[in-house]
Amino acid sequence: MLKGKHIILGVTGSIAAYKSALLCRLLVSAGAEVKVVMTPLAKQFITPLTMATLSKNPILVDFFNPENGEWNSHVKLGLWADCYLIAPATANTMAKMAEGVADNLLLTTYLSARCPVMVAPAMDCDMYAHCATQRNIERLRKDGVHFVEAEEGELASGLVGSGRMAEPQHIVDAVVKLLAEKKKRTLDGKHYLVTAGATIEAIDPVRYISNHSSGKMGYAIAEELAERGAKVTLVSGRTALDKPAGVERVDVLSAEEMYEACVARYDEVDGAVMCAAVADYTPQQVASEKIKKGEGDMSIALKRTPDIAAELGRRKRQGQLLVGFAMETQNETANAEDKLRRKNFDFIVLNSLRVEGAGFRGDTNVVSLIDSASREDLPLMTKREVAARIVDKIEKSL
Ligand code: PMT
């Protein structure tokens, strides 16, 4: 239900913090990757070791690691997340959130997060009913924060009333619903081809030529298209990623295999997004046995691979959309604009290895969306957010 989703679980200093252990386990079981941020006081109610073990990630409490000075970037954390869930949330934390106070990592992350924020309050019934708390909840609702209402029952104080943190399963259900609602099935009935990952060009049975693509950018695009209702065929070079839910994956290795897979399917689709890092050259000969090393140097003769995107650009029919990528290290704009024209792309996504946080392997990218009439420079975002912006542009062109 939450497969591939990134969730920050914020834990504050409430007796209900013991329930966040189960909550964390349920989120992980539902497929989410969870990073836990705790306030200093929360550590007194539940140990970081418990939460680290359950979330399978180190716990974040301080702005930096006092042992080695390593900075815990709340900005990166906020960009990474698909949802920021604060459970339990005390009256104190909600008051600070409403005021924009930023005196701990949980709060700075709240101010940096671009994803939906969900809060599960927990406190004594009189504190919960107090007009100050209700005023803060109302202000946070107006700021776009989502709430899982506190439930009625016996409280730690011995009183009975409303203020118990909602049961962990109810909170998980609310997160699933929230993330599903965020997506509107605007691409129902459409079919897209997406290429992703690195191609592998064999030299001999042991060695190959490849590149650093992890497939994350292309897989994020495939996921985004599928979540908006499109049928997606993902032609994937080598990656370590799992198949995204609801996507048909065609595994290939070489540029030649990727070419065959794409050309065979292009007629059926409404568009294609060419995100794979495809080798431009491949060995002229693939040795059938492992090449033995000799005394001197050696060289390998290479030949050009087919340009898949250019071929799809030639075959593009009226109404079909072709989106390309450009991975550059110099003269970025000129090279991207040249590829836009030469390969007959409707628009191109430029990313540069010279920009920190952009390109291969990481969870973020910095891209420009360029078409023949306009250019949009996007800031540092998660690859999921970049994918959403690319798919927004695809939707606009329909
Ligand atoms: O996979 P990640 O680790 O998340 O990294 C993402 C990425 C950096 C791989 C991705 O953002 C990206 O930039 N992909 C394109 C990489 C690339 O090969 O760019 P290029 O400028 O060499 O190629 C231009 C376009 O032609 C691309 O759309 C490419 O898919 C396509 N191409 C290139 C060569 C070829 N033989 N056939 C092609 O279709």
Image (tube, rainbow, N blue to C red):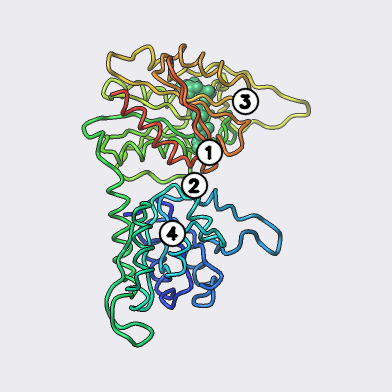
Residue 98, which numbered label? 4
Residue 266 image label:
none
Kind of residue indicated by mark 3? Thr
Mark 2 = which residue? 79
Residue 2, relative to residue 318: is it above or below? below
Tell me whether the residue at label 1 lies in contact with that at label 3, contact meaning CB atoms closer than 8 angstroms. Answer: no
Closer mark to the observer between disc 4 and disc 1: 4
Q: In terms of depth relative to the viewer, which is nearer, 46 or 315?
A: 46
Residue extending farthest right? 295
Labels 4 & 1 near each other (Cβ < 8 A) = no
Residue 199 in sight in this render: no
Disc 4 or 1, which lies upstream in sequence? 4
Where disc 1 sits, the SS reads: loop
Q: Amino acid at mark 4?
A: Ala
Query: Disc 3 on helix, strand or loop?
Result: loop
**Residue highlighted by disc 1:** 380
The x, y position of residue 248, in whole percent, is 31, 37
Measure the alpha-carbon separation of dots 3 and 2.
25 Å
Within 8 Å: ligand 1 and the Cβ of disc 4? no
Q: Of label 1 and label 3, which has the lower sequence position?
A: 3
The CA distance from mark 1 to mark 3 is 17 Å
Q: Are marks 2 and 1 in contact (CB under 8 Å)?
A: yes
